[in-house]
Amino acid sequence: MSALTIRPVTTAADLAAVVDLCWAYRDFLYHFGPTEQRIVETFYPQDKYSALMARLPEEHARPRGIILLAERDGIPLGCGMSHALTETESEIKRVFVTDAARGTGAGRAICQRLVDQAREDGFEKVYLDTSVGFAPARALYRSLGFVERGPYQPMPDFTRDAICFFEMPLRDVAAPAD
């Protein structure tokens, strides 16, 4: 078996693979549990998600965002993306790996690459969120240095106990001068 490759999306075929993975992610969320189903119905109804998929290239375009594709032997196994929230803050979105890639380090590699890219792009902080029910994802984010926080964007009340929000500072905070 060859090594896992994490690379930026550069072709229409790459983008099509990511869109397929994003739809698989939506399906995974929808079928995970009733809370996640409600989240999908609220934030990602079919027509809204279709429009979101059509805008991926613009919303996550370089130099202030990126879309990554994880693959092995030419087979897409996962994806992740980031985009600017402000001039100094970035958000990681739709990190997803297929069943075949779970436990292989693909999710960690995607996340680390997204964090590294945000740092290289000059962002000072990066955010992400995940379902409370996704314990392995929450553990992964903590192990990478993310810390839990409150919502970083307006959210409906029902999500208060359903979604975990994380942040990671990307620049060392200088100690105050004496």
Image: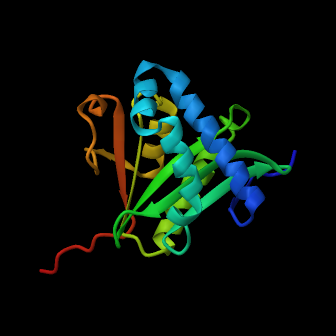
Q: Residue furthest front?
A: 47
Q: Position of residue 125 (x, y in %)?
A: 36, 63
In-front residue for pair 46/110: 46
Quadrant location of residue 131?
top left
Residue drawn where x is 77% and y is 57% of the image: 13
Judge left or right: residue 118 versus residue 146.
right
Can the viewer see residue 154?
A: yes
In-front residue for pair 43/102: 43
Q: Position of residue 159 (x, y in %)?
A: 31, 32
Q: Position of residue 94 (x, y in %)?
A: 53, 46
| Quadrant the C terminus occupies | bottom left
In-front residue for pair 136/162: 162
Quadrant location of residue 68?
bottom right
Quadrant location of residue 129?
top left
Judge left or right: residue 163 versus residue 121.
left
Can the viewer see residue 105?
A: no
Q: What's the colour scheme?
A: rainbow
| Quadrant the N terminus occupies | top right
State whether residue 156 is above or below residue 154: above
Q: Position of residue 50 (x, y in %)?
A: 56, 45
